[in-house]
Image (tube, coloured by chain):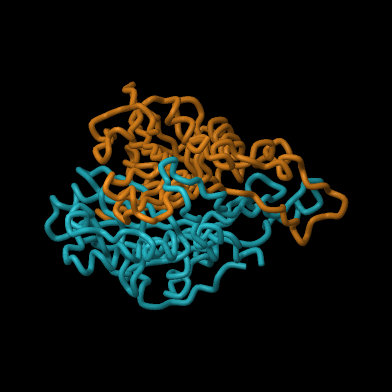
Chain colours: A orange, B cyan
Amino acid sequence: MSTEPTTSAPMSDRTRIRRIPELGAYDRTTIDAILDAGIVAHVGFVQDGQPIVIPTLHARIDDMLYIHGSAASRTLKSVAEGLAVCVTVTLLDGIVLARSIFEHSIDYRSVVVLGTATLVNDPEDKLASLHALSEQILPGRWADSREPTDKELKATTILRLPLTEASAKISAGPPEDAEADGHLDVWAGNLPFVVKALEPIPDPALRPGIPVPDYLTHYSRDGLTTPPNYA
Amino acid sequence: MSTEPTTSAPMSDRTRIRRIPELGAYDRTTIDAILDAGIVAHVGFVQDGQPIVIPTLHARIDDMLYIHGSAASRTLKSVAEGLAVCVTVTLLDGIVLARSIFEHSIDYRSVVVLGTATLVNDPEDKLASLHALSEQILPGRWADSREPTDKELKATTILRLPLTEASAKISAGPPEDAEADGHLDVWAGNLPFVVKALEPIPDPALRPGIPVPDYLTHYSRDGLTTPPNYA
């Protein structure tokens, strides 16, 4: 059930999947689909020798990954040539219940991107990446909202890194108990998870007469609301 | 709506929340609740100067955080005195829709734990931490499954680090638009997210006559299935 790894440009010795290598994938179609389905990314960087991992938002424009950079920007600003980062996006698809504790696992899709993050300074690039970040999370919202002013743009920190070194890992499918455990009187299978949006909650200060927009009432995420691995 | 920060032992200069400090919390009650509600943790470590961030499973026993350590174990084994890590757990609670793009944000709860991870070698400690990892994800499952053999225990890598340096960050509540934007004809409010378990999927090889256990049909997670910040 795991994706067949196909090798293409983004694989490197550093991103090669060593742990259960048959779950690894290096093709951009697989990598992009996981990045594009995620809401939260975890960015890792090193500060005085200590690794720091912070949740952030991300979006992809073609071969470039953008992340909201507030948490890392203070560190980045001390490193003129850019900051070594790892950006990881994980989609939790479910629990795999085997008959033995040992074979229990998690169904997930994840992407690890390594690279050097730099600040996005050009106002047009910044606006385009903010637009991508907005569409990544809530398609349709940008067109409805007040766009950033120049001052707001300046107060926003966006980092970017090229998608030149990345790998995906997909774990999916039924449990794989040892044959000797197959006879056990234990339920086995998968418990799938989805991220589900509940009813929108209006701002207490919302002016009356403004309807809930369509993109909220029909909010769903391909790959999140329907885990593809159980189809 | 943000949690009032109260200072206690786990705060350090490295974990002090610098970005929007009023969202920070350092009390163990807040930290433990977020750690205990999470299914996935992201562990960061440094390999040849490069930060690496890998999704993993975690569980807490009292003042100790345990993580499933396969991904980091190869690196850890080259560092006899333990591996500097950052373990981050993030719960995605929803999207905050402001009238201006600039004030859009995410409602989330996260914990960042810094420390030195060491291998759990003692078989009894290892069994106890595996039990905690199992209960963290699927309470009740351990008692139903075949327990690990000595050989399986040896093949499992568990890391641990003490909860001595940790901080929480909670972002919650309605949008905070500038007063000048309040008149805009734009819907504003929150779109809450939950992680929801779907119907369990039996293993195709499941023996007939084994019922779906109660802990699956009634699976829910406090803090995940009911985002507490919207109560």
Query: B187 left or right of A41?
Result: right
Query: B189 left or right of B27?
Result: right
Q: Nearer the viewer, residue A76 or B105?
A: B105
Point out residue A6 in the picture as x, y percentages from the top left corner.
34, 23
Assign the N terminus of chain B to one quadrant of the image. Answer: bottom right
Point out residue A11 in the picture as x, y percentages from the top left corner.
30, 28
Q: Is residue B203 above or below residue A12?
A: below
Assign the C terminus of chain B to one quadrant of the image. Answer: bottom right
Query: B17 left or right of B106?
Result: left
The residue at the point 47 percent across, 77 percent down is B6
Query: B180 left or right of A34?
Result: right
Q: Is residue B57 above or below residue A165?
A: below
Residue A73 in view, yes or no: no
Point out residue A93 in the picture as x, y percentages from the top left corner.
48, 45
Residue A18 in view, yes or no: yes
Point out residue B38 in the picture as x, y percentages from the top left corner.
45, 59
Q: Give residue A7's quadrant in the image.
A: top left
Return the residue found at the far front. B209
Q: Nearer the viewer, residue B99 or B163?
A: B163
The residue at the point 24 percent across, 53 percent down is A49
Q: Is residue A221 above or below residue B5?
A: above
